[in-house]
Amino acid sequence: MDSDYGVPRELSEVQQNRTLYQPELPPCLQGTTVRVEYGDVAIAADPAGAHVISHAYPHTYGQPLAHFLRKAANVPDAKVISEHPAVRVGIVFCGRQSPGGHNVIWGLHEAIKAHNVNSKLIGFLGGTDGLLAQKTLEITNEVLSSYKNQGGYDMLGRTKDQIRTTEQVNGAMATCQALKLDALVIIGGVTSNTDAAQLAETFAEAKCATKVVGVPVTLNGDLKNQFVETTVGFDTICKVNSQLISNMCTDALSAEKYYYFIRMMGRKASHVALECALQSHPNMVILGEEVAASKLTIFDITKQICDAVQARAEKDKNHGVILIPEGLVESIPELYALLQEINGLHGKGVSVENISSQLSPWASALFEFLPQFIRQQVCIDSVNSQNPTIDIRFLLLQHSCFFIMQLLLRPESDDSAQLSQIETEKLLAQLVETEMNKRLKEGTYKGKKFNAICHFFGYQARGAMPSKFDCDYAYVLGHVCYHILAAGLNGYMATVTNLKSPLNKWRCGAAPISSMMTVKRWSRGPATTQIGKPAVHMASVDLRGKAYEMLRQNSSSCLLEDIYRNPGPLQFEGPGADAKPISLCVEDQDYMGRIKKLQEYLEKVKSIVKPGCSQDVLKAALSAMSSVTETLAIMTSSSTGQPPL
Amino acid sequence: MDSDYGVPRELSEVQQNRTLYQPELPPCLQGTTVRVEYGDVAIAADPAGAHVISHAYPHTYGQPLAHFLRKAANVPDAKVISEHPAVRVGIVFCGRQSPGGHNVIWGLHEAIKAHNVNSKLIGFLGGTDGLLAQKTLEITNEVLSSYKNQGGYDMLGRTKDQIRTTEQVNGAMATCQALKLDALVIIGGVTSNTDAAQLAETFAEAKCATKVVGVPVTLNGDLKNQFVETTVGFDTICKVNSQLISNMCTDALSAEKYYYFIRMMGRKASHVALECALQSHPNMVILGEEVAASKLTIFDITKQICDAVQARAEKDKNHGVILIPEGLVESIPELYALLQEINGLHGKGVSVENISSQLSPWASALFEFLPQFIRQQVCIDSVNSQNPTIDIRFLLLQHSCFFIMQLLLRPESDDSAQLSQIETEKLLAQLVETEMNKRLKEGTYKGKKFNAICHFFGYQARGAMPSKFDCDYAYVLGHVCYHILAAGLNGYMATVTNLKSPLNKWRCGAAPISSMMTVKRWSRGPATTQIGKPAVHMASVDLRGKAYEMLRQNSSSCLLEDIYRNPGPLQFEGPGADAKPISLCVEDQDYMGRIKKLQEYLEKVKSIVKPGCSQDVLKAALSAMSSVTETLAIMTSSSTGQPPL
């Protein structure tokens, strides 16, 4: 017997009220008639990788952007889709659950039924496992009733994260053919959308009629590019976590004796930590991207924190809150090397028991790395320390015990799962404590004894009820999925842009997933992507972006002045209910708007410099345009000298 | 330089909106004229301890209850307080911060100023440290402006938890005299209110003019007795935690592969865990009170959980959520013994380093306890196991490493602080995992590999913005404090009862703190209260109460059917905003109402059996009353045979 998927359930007062919330549609999707305007062919942002991608995706790379417009929109080339035959659409949750996922299904169901009541939406049970095993549940209003605007993926469930091997891809195709699906919608993050693109390509190659559509849903917020401004779930995760971080700040300020080290979920990129820091104003946040860019060692980071603790103590502040992104550990060179070694051993099939008894390869790495750190300390302060050897041995024992046990605890095949098991915050807290005790003893630090308490904020937000923004965004994306499949597009991702503006200004469209891909050109070890394999890669925090600039502008007052801010618990009514992520609102992301604006400029030049204009005007136009095209050609040519496609 | 106490600060949209929320007052406290009705003398609930308490509190035990009534209330004996001279009142946060604390100060400030604008409210900075050091901040509207309805204790801060030693008590008295305080209001839980009673007694003895008033504010909800229905902060803590637990339930159901072991804050009693379980319907909750009542060993608890995991696996459910109250570890006999031994060593001044190198006394206890558990397993399944010795050694190494490190991490003087450092959830998860792996190997368990992920939900709720209920309750209690001091009462706690009814039915009063005391008659080791010392003790979960009954009624469906419920994030507007704790609402706690009802019955008997009534009626009355008085006398006489005072 299976878990009770899609079964209506008893809801609390707040849950019931949420099921009654009806997201709106932007004007372009209202009514049953929608126009599609095709833009220029979309190219990959990195021209150097374009030919690799083009080669790997011959059927699905180089397709145009699509914009969905109102029936009445004054665009001559737009095509009205007027035929709406009954369709059969499959939908599946891939990867980790993210608040708002249910609303994608709801939106798609609404759109499908609005255009043809005989169309069917079929959910796969238990994620990709269900897709391969053809375990389905027909989505109906009754099934949806208690899942509208609710968190989790429990209406359908999810299991494994990938559809990648030939066997998996063929299994998916067999299911699509057996169920006669016109389209398959895949809800997920970077990995799942890469898989979606691969499926689309394989299906096109095999002349399988099923079109594949991806939807950007991941709480990590790391599926971000020129077409995708943010992902479904990111807002909720940041709101729930910011509330908790703010509570910790209030707590720290009330008790005035603890440093809270809080590790945040978010995988390798630090988007969640950045947004939460902008919301809550903790004393410190260490982004993985900063560490990687500055090549900071664990010693540098420890010293940074210790100096901060010391500076605060001089202002009589013996408390604080420090955010540690989950991905930090991979951004620190020494720890990354250690992790790679463990992954390598595990990849060779060495079992947990044997790793524990045959520690030599990576234990030696650990023993190389930790003393290296300690030795640096000892060198700097060797004048004052009498007998550093004892301390080192004691520390090593402690740390290695902690660290080894954590690494051994669950060396899962999925390296990101392992990532969330590494308690970087505890390692850092211990190193800082040791150093502060040393400074205290030496008299360089004169504050109170350093006290750290560690937390991991991850799972407690992942199943949260989605914010209004995520409810709306997901619902609209669901509708967009229908229009993509009605237009017969394959290998596209549903997009909604201009999200920081009110919903009635949102732009709906679709972009080929392959145009979001990049190609990694170096090997970082056995566990990472192979050289040259195109994929939608997670986007790092942009250290030149406005959100990061905002963080750094406030960083010294945050550090020293306790300007904590509490966005409050996630609200569904009243003030705060309509808030959007700060990092979304400060960035100037209107890519689609700019594409339009450029077209306008080009039209304007044409209209001014018409045949009959003066020779001078024509000369000026030629000179100016020559300069423009030259500049752009230089900017877009890659370092390898390959021209863009 | 000090932290910036009471400084107005930048607030988020939700915070700003909260500062505008104005709690109402029940009719009895509206207007500037309030009547006080004195009830009968309040006695301690445990008659056996009454004489000890009476002896320890000669000036403050045996005072009457006080009820605050509307000016127009039809109660002939009530006294109208019409004189309102300017007063000077001190207020201090004691013990751990609890959401709503700021509103007590706001309510008191409002009441004080409404009755005489020349009165002053003086806050002590940094808790009892500030009280002893006379560090003060005058509370004004400006100071309060950004702290109304906000969480934390950061307007004033708090440090140490107690005012107990002669030095501390004398220091507090010196402050009260130096600042010419008419009253000192102490905001805190069981410990702080015990201290308040002691201060009141000492002040009365020393003829110090300052009256001492206690206010029941603690997130643990363990200050509960006939006069106190719940404490300020409990509702918020349970709401924030229930939301997170519900998120975990949704998460577990979506991913279908993890068991989440969640340890809850709440000190020795399990009120928070009980309320959260009633809100969220997790699969299992193990209350410390149940374990203590049934004298369950760690082996029993592990077996219970394993059997549950097995039963769920038979229904194809390989996920779940299990709540572990913080106090559980002290309720398990073997672990309690171990803790006592460590506390004892630490109490003797053995330093952390020496404990780690001279482990013998309590390490032997650990080594006695763990094998005992393992041996039981081995005995039961000795037929199947080939070489159990290796497993035992491996387990011991793992567990003792974990456990010892945790215990060593922070052996603070405050044993409850240490309590929150013991990761009981990890110990249990490991024991369950070991047992499940064993059952899997033996074929008695046929489900998927058991996967546990552990969490501790504590600090992340403690600084939360208070719920509307806590805002209202705290604000009203603040007002009550003023009326207590206006009536010249000393050693009282402010009370608001009938809380489950709408605010306009709330009853306001005051009860002598000494009447809430009990006397412990046994020694449980060096770290617990001495024999015979009266104190307000924390109340355990009532295993005969309706809230517990409700929990047990649903327990088997919760265990097997995943009837998870999500109360949602704490709302300030719309549905859910007015919710109160379930455990408050289901209990029939109207003690004050019943006291009144009894008086009515007695009056009725008098009015029926007046001189002139028939002999038969008189005989019947005598016979009935004789039986009633005899029954009550037996019920209230203690086991030691001492009559109540």
Image: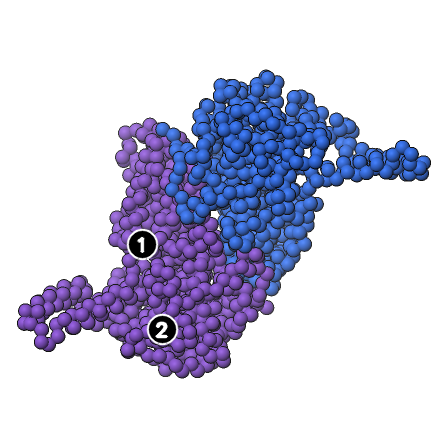
Chain colours: A purple, B blue
Q: Quadrant of the N terminus of chain B?
A: top left
**Circle nearer the N terminus (2, 1):** 2
The secondary element bearing badge 1 is classed as helix
Task: Determine the chain carrying the residue at label 1.
Answer: A
Give the image location of residue B355, x and y in percent. Answer: 49, 32
Say whether residue B499 is left or right of residue A284.
right
- Callout 1 environment at 10 Å: few (<14), some (14 to 19), or many (20+)? some
Observer able to see residue B219: no
Query: In this rendering, is residue B397 above or below A631?
Result: above
| Front tag of 2 and 1 | 2
Q: A253 or B365, which is in the foreground? A: A253
Residue at x-position 64% and y-position 43%? B505
Q: Quadrant of the C terminus of chain B?
A: top right
The residues tagged by marks 2 and 1 sit, at their Cα atoms, a distance apart of: 28 Å
Q: A95 or B130, which is in the foreground? A: B130
Give the residue at the far left of this rendering. Answer: A615
Q: Mark 2 is on which residue type?
A: Arg
Query: In this rendering, is residue B313 above or below B511?
Result: below
Give the image location of residue A104, x and y in percent. Answer: 44, 67
